[in-house]
C-alpha cells in the first residue's frame, strides 16, 4: 500500500519505457481519423511523427496517453502497450497512464501567475503525489536542469512563469512534465511557436532526455526530425480517407532513401 507521503527519489532518473501502438483506429463522431496504425516506439529513443496537416499526427499522439478522450464523441480501437501492458485495459487507472506518459504542447502553457518553482511542482498536485520540502527543492532543481532552464532561472524561482520568454516557458513546461517522472514524453510540435535559438536549445534538451524518457515528437520541421529522431513515421491521409502510416523506419535511411514515392516527395518539400 502506497503511503500518502511517498518520497520521490530524485537521484535516480526514471527509466524509459517502450510504447507499442497496435492497429490504432480513431474517430471523432462519424469522422474516421486514423485507420489501423501500428508503430513500435522503443524505450530511450526519439520517434518523430511527420506528415502534412490534418493527417492525424496529433490525434495519434493523443491516443498514446488517452488524451483524445477529452474530445466529445472520440472513439478508439486497438491497443497501446507501455512496456507490454495495454493502457486501454479497463483495469488500468487513467491517472497512472497520464503519470507515466507526459505531454508537451505546441503553445507553451505554464500557469502564468504561478511561480517558476510552483509550475514545476504543479503536476505533483494533479497526480496527488506528496513530497517533503527538501525533496521538492531537489526535484525542482533536477527537473529545471534536465529541462535545460536551471542556469537561467535559479536566482528567480519565485518569479511568475508568465514572465519568461516563449522558449523558456516551453522549457518550463518540459521541466513540469518531468516532475511527475514520466517514462514517455509526447511532444506535439513543441518548437513551432519558438525562435530558432530556443528551438536549438530544446532540441539539445530532447537528445539528452531520451536516455531517461522515451520521446515521441510531432514535427513539421524536417531538419528537426533529422537532428533529433532515431526513427520516423510518415503519416498521410488521402482525400476523404483516414490517416495511415505510409512508411516508417530509421530516420537517416528514410531521409536518404525513402521507399515510397510519397515519402520522397514529402521529405523533399514537394507538398
Ligand atoms: P494533424 O495533427 O496531423 O494536423 P489532427 O490529428 O489534428 O491532424 O487531425 C486529424 C483529423 O481529425 C482532421 O481531419 C481534423 O479536422 C480532425 N480533428 C482533430 N481534432 C478534432 C476534434 N477535436 N474534433 C473533431 N475533429 C477533429
Ligand atoms: Mg497536429
Image (cartoon, rainbow, N blue to C red):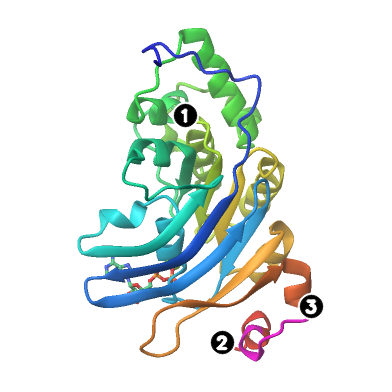
Residue 108 seen: yes
Q: Which residue is mark 3?
A: 256
Q: Are marks 2 and 1 in contact (CB under 8 Å)?
A: no
Earlier in the chain: of badge 2 and badge 1, it is 1
Earlier in the chain: of badge 2 and badge 3, it is 3
Q: Residues within 10 Å of mark 3 (few under 14, many from 20)?
A: few
Towards the viewer: 113 or 18: 18
Towards the viewer: 106 or 238: 238
Residue lying at 27% horizontally and 53% vertically, measured from the top left: 70
Give the residues in magenta.
256-263
Q: Split into 4 quadrants, where in the image is the C terminus?
A: bottom right
Disc 1 C-beta below 8 A from ligand 2: no
Q: CA distance from mark 2 to mark 3?
A: 18 Å
Task: Using the image, tell me which numbered label, if any, was put on residue 51.
Answer: none
Residue lying at 39% horizontally and 69% vertically, measured from the top left: 25
Q: Are marks 2 and 3 in contact (CB under 8 Å)?
A: no
Q: Which residue is mark 1?
A: 120
Q: Which residue is mark 2?
A: 271
Amino acid at each position: 500500500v502506497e503511503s500518502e507521503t511517498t518520497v520521490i527519489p530524485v537521484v535516480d532518473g526514471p527509466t524509459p519505457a517502450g510504447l507499442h501502438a497496435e492497429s490504432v483506429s480513431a474517430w471523432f463522431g462519424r469522422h474516421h481519423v486514423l485507420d489501423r496504425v501500428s508503430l513500435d516506439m522503443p524505450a530511450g529513443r526519439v520517434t518523430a511523427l511527420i506528415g502534412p496537416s490534418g493527417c492525424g499526427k496529433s490525434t495519434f499522439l493523443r491516443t498514446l496517453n488517452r488524451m483524445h478522450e477529452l474530445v466529445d464523441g472520440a472513439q478508439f480501437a486497438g491497443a497501446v502497450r507501455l512496456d507490454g501492458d495495454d493502457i486501454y485495459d479497463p483495469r488500468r487507472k487513467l491517472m497512472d497512464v497520464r503519470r507515466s506518459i507526459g505531454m508537451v504542447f505546441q503553445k507553451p502553457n505554464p500557469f502564468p501567475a504561478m511561480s517558476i518553482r510552483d509550475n514545476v511542482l504543479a503536476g505533483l498536485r494533479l497526480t496527488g503525489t506528496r513530497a517533503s520540502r527538501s525533496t521538492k527543492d531537489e526535484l525542482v532543481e533536477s527537473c529545471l536542469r534536465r529541462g535545460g532552464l536551471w542556469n537561467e532561472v535559479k536566482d528567480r524561482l519565485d518569479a511568475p512563469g508568465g514572465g519568461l520568454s516563449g522558449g523558456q516557458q516551453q522549457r518550463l513546461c518540459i521541466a513540469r512534465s518531468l516532475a511527475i517522472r514520466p517514462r514517455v514524453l509526447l511532444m506535439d510540435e513543441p518548437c513551432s511557436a519558438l525562435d530558432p535559438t530556443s528551438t536549438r536549445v530544446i532540441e539539445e534538451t530532447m537528445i539528452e532526455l531520451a536516455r531517461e524518457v522515451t520521446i515521441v515528437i510531432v514535427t513539421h520541421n524536417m531538419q528537426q526530425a533529422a537532428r533529433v529522431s532515431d526513427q520516423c513515421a510518415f503519416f498521410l491521409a488521402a482525400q476523404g480517407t483516414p490517416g495511415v502510416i505510409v512508411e516508417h523506419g530509421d530516420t537517416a535511411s528514410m531521409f536518404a532513401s525513402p521507399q515510397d514515392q510519397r515519402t520522397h516527395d514529402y521529405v523533399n518539400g514537394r507538398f
